[in-house]
C-alpha cells in the first residue's frame, strides 16, 4: 500500500485550506471592483472547497475493499460536481453576481489541486 487513509485525509485537508485561502485572497483582490465582485470571487473559490470537502468526506469515510472504495470515489466526484454546478447556478443565476470574478475564483481554487500534488510535505 503506497498511501494510508491518514495521509489522504491530511492532503485533502491541506487542499481545502489552500482553496479557501485563495478564495479569500481573491475576494480581497476583487474588492476594488466592488463588494459584489468580491463576493463572487470568494463564492467561486468556496464552492470548489466545499465540493472538495464533500469528495474527501465521501472517499475517506473508512477502510473498504477496492470496488467499494472506487464506488465511493466516483460518487464523491459526482457529488463534488453537483455542488460546483449548483453553486455556479446560484452565484450567476439567482444572485446575478459578476461572472468573471466567480469564474476567476473557481479556476484559481481548482488550480490548487494541481499545486497540492507537486509539493510533498
Image (spheres, rainbow, N blue to C red):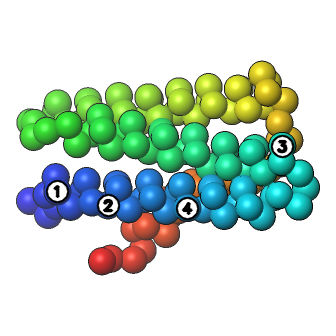
Q: Residues within 10 Å of mark 1 (few under 14, many from 20)?
A: few
Residue 97: image quadrant is top right
Contact check, label 1 and label 3, Cβ < 8 Å: no
- x and y percent of residue 50 in the render? 49, 40
User: 70 and 17: which one is in front?
Assistant: 17
Q: Vertical placement of 3 versus 49: above or below?
A: below
Separation of marks 1 and 3 at Cα, in angstroms: 39 Å
The residue shown at (50%, 47%) is 49
- x and y percent of residue 70 in the render? 24, 36
Where is mark 4, residue-wise?
21
Q: Which of the labelled discs sits on residue 29, or is there none?
A: none
Separation of marks 1 and 2 at Cα, in angstroms: 9 Å
Where is mark 3, residue-wise?
36
Q: Secondary structure at mark 2?
A: helix
Tag in front: 4 or 2: 4
Where is mark 2, residue-wise?
11
The residue shown at (30%, 38%) is 57
Q: Is residue 106 visible?
A: no
Q: Residues within 10 Å of mark 3 (few under 14, many from 20)?
A: some
Amino acid at each position: 500500500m503506497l498511501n494510508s487513509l491518514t495521509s489522504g485525509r491530511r492532503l485533502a485537508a491541506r487542499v481545502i485550506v489552500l482553496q479557501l485561502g485563495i478564495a479569500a485572497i481573491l475576494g480581497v483582490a476583487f474588492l476594488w471592483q466592488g463588494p459584489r465582485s468580491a463576493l463572487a470571487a470568494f463564492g467561486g473559490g468556496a464552492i470548489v472547497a466545499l465540493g472538495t470537502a464533500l469528495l474527501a468526506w465521501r472517499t475517506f469515510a473508512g477502510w473498504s475493499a477496492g470496488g467499494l472504495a472506487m464506488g465511493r470515489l466516483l460518487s464523491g466526484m459526482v457529488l463534488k460536481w453537483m455542488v460546483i454546478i449548483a453553486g455556479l447556478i446560484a452565484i450567476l443565476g439567482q444572485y446575478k453576481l459578476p461572472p468573471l470574478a466567480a469564474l476567476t475564483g473557481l479556476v484559481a481554487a481548482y488550480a490548487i489541486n494541481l499545486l497540492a500534488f507537486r509539493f510533498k510535505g
